[in-house]
Amino acid sequence: MSDIFFLILRRMRMPLIFLISVYSISTIGMTLMPGIDPNGDTWHMSFFHAFYFVSFMGTTIGFGEIPYPFTDAQRAWVLGCIYTSVIAWLYGIGSLLRLVQDETFRYAVSERNFRVSINRIDQPFYIICGYGETGELITQGLADMGIQTVVIDIDPERTNAIELNNLSIPPIVLNADIKEPKNLTSAGIKGGWCRGVIAVTQNDHVNLKVAVACKLIKPDVPVICRSEIEDEAANMESFGTNFIVNPYLTFARRINLLTQNPGLHRIQNWFINQHSEEHLHQSVAQSGLPKGRWLVCGYGRFGRAVTQALADIEVEITVVDPDPIASRAPKGTIVGRGTEAKTLREAGIDDATVVVAASDDDANNLSILITAKQINKNVVTIGRVSHESDQMLFEQARCDYIFRRSLVVANEVLTLISRPLVTRFIQYSYTLTKSATEELIAQICQLTGNKSPVTWRLAVRADRSPALTSHLQAGGALNVEDLCRHQRIPRANAIPLLLWRDNISHLMPSPDMPVQENDEILFCARRNTDLLAQRLCDNEELVDTLINGNEHSIPLIRWLSRKVQH
Amino acid sequence: MNFEKVVFAFFIILALSLNFGFFLGEISESTHHHPYELFAALFISLICTVMKFGDRTHFGSTVLASSLVVDGLLITAAITWALATTDGRVISPMAMASITSLAGGALMANLISVILLIIETGQIRK
């Protein structure tokens, strides 16, 4: 508030001084000009009359000549006064209007509004730095989960879209340079409700700077950074950035998994991409990517990540790159873009199993995919989309697996934030054997009817699940099976994925494992249903009925019988 | 030399001088106090007030406060004068005395402004 007030006062100095001067000089002049009264005597206006006259003259012009008709000298003076006072008023009002349109003034107003809304936050929130495609997906995902966000981006054109998105929990927006640490402070990083900072700008160095600033301003706030360059990632890691998300490495790992263990890839895909699904062809998802001979067109960051991720499995990779020396491509690289049939033939497209269009140009990538399909019908295609809007074209080109950087980053960030147990499950899931994976998939498919499942976390704590906690404290027995299925409500069945106890993860806990207080259990179940565990956690009657086996009568009779007992 | 400072010091000292000039003389004697001088003192004091608008320094806000006091007192004096001379009456010694004493009060506030100005100037170290 004070900023705006002082700014107005400061800007209005000159117009006000001008206005006061004009009025004063006019008034003095009016008292000096000689007039003639009806008796023919000379008279001079008093200050009171002069000020009265100047006041109505300046604002309305035309109340008549009072108290007696003016002499020519008085009229000449009034003529001058009229024009100067009009100018003074125009100048004053003009300055005020200009001030309202002034950038600095508007910035002060928007900054004040921002500060007020930050101070009003009374729930956990995340700060999102950079509102590009990734930031948009993350904001959307967090809003869907009911989490408040604060978005900082320098470009008002991008953040204006937030208003139009109509999110259920509208983010608080600041248009400011995130490289300035004071903007992080004004976004409320020091307040007790800030749960984390997510730096997802296009520029790695900016993300790095945000991470450094956060760690210096408030070391215990978790920082999640997007990083596409490995040097910067190592730099970020060196001062304790909590999570670094590299879309290229992540996606390359997923390609590797899809080649080696498609089942596990499918499970991870379900659990990571709960908000927006990846585009992956059904048959490829079932059978995985074929081994054999792969063509990687474009040896940039993505091409390199794919090549490295596949290095230890039996895949023969041929790289195609227009400038192998500049991009430090491996030996045997075919020179060319891969958009022409000639280059692709040279690289051996006829007996290739997979083509990866990895350049950073959407048009070239599309051209590669279409040409490759024309030459070899059976080839599996993986395409990289740089611009969100081109996604549709890749789908039209029947690309089997589409890599969208923003989606990969957003899904990983959302998983990290909202589903810590899922992250753990994914880490540990690599230890599952192939047959265990197949079995889990079969179980899930049977449960959900071949649709993608959702995950849900149960925390056996007094604040989150009072009914279960009091049951356990009363010495009641409870095992995992009890929380997962009951013949009375078969639709509410769930599959336990992970049990977290005393910082130890128990992957796929067995049904007869006893549940203790402070356990956290990750379940997966059918979409849009209330899980059994979800119903049990705060419903003591239900716990008593289903777990202790005490049959309850109709609520009214139960209530009456209790009355009698007491 | 800071031009802005020169202008401000000029106005603040001018306000004091004009005010003093008006105040000088027999307190109830209307021939000793000229209305133009009162008007000039009020005008300059208003300018001083506006010049300190939006100044967030401690000095600026104190000067703003004291010049607001000056404005208040001088405006009251001017209104008293206007009321005392309505419909062509000659100003009474009693009214003149109260106008002069109001101007005397304003003189004190003006003096404080000038003292503040001097203190502030003294604080600047080369």
Image: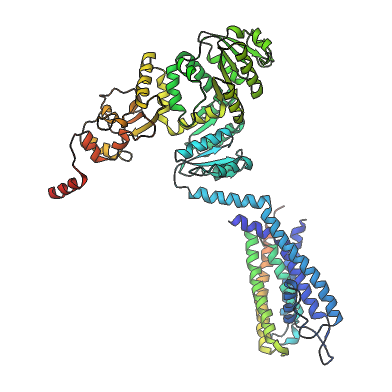
Q: Residue furthest left?
A: A565
Q: Nearer the viewer, residue A430 or A407?
A: A407
Number of marks in picture: 0
> Would you place residue A357 above or below residue A93 in this image?
above
Q: Residue furthest bottom?
A: A39
Residue under the point 61% across and 55% down:
A3
> Would you place residue A94 above or below residue A270 in this image?
below
Q: Would you say residue A235 is visible in this rendering?
A: no
Position of A415 with respect to B68 (left or right) is left
Q: Nearer the viewer, residue A221 or A409?
A: A409
Residue under the point 68% across and 56% down:
A99
Q: Measuring from the top left, give residue B110's x and y in whole percent.
A: 68, 71
In the picture, the quarter occupied by the N terminus of chain A is bottom right
> Would you place residue A365 above or below residue A47 in this image?
above
Tell me which corner region of the image, top left, top right, bottom left or bottom right, holds residue A78: bottom right
Q: Measuring from the top left, give residue A527's x and y in whole percent.
A: 39, 32
Q: Would you say residue A77 is visible in this rendering?
A: yes
Q: Measuring from the top left, give residue A277's x and y in whole percent.
A: 49, 28
Position of A283 with respect to A29 (left or right) is left
Tell me which corner region of the image, top left, top right, bottom left or bottom right, holds residue A504: top left
Q: Measuring from the top left, give residue A309's x and y in whole percent.
A: 53, 15
> Would you place residue A524 above or below residue B45 in this image?
above
Q: Coloring scheme of the render?
A: rainbow
Q: Nearer the viewer, residue A558 or A370?
A: A370
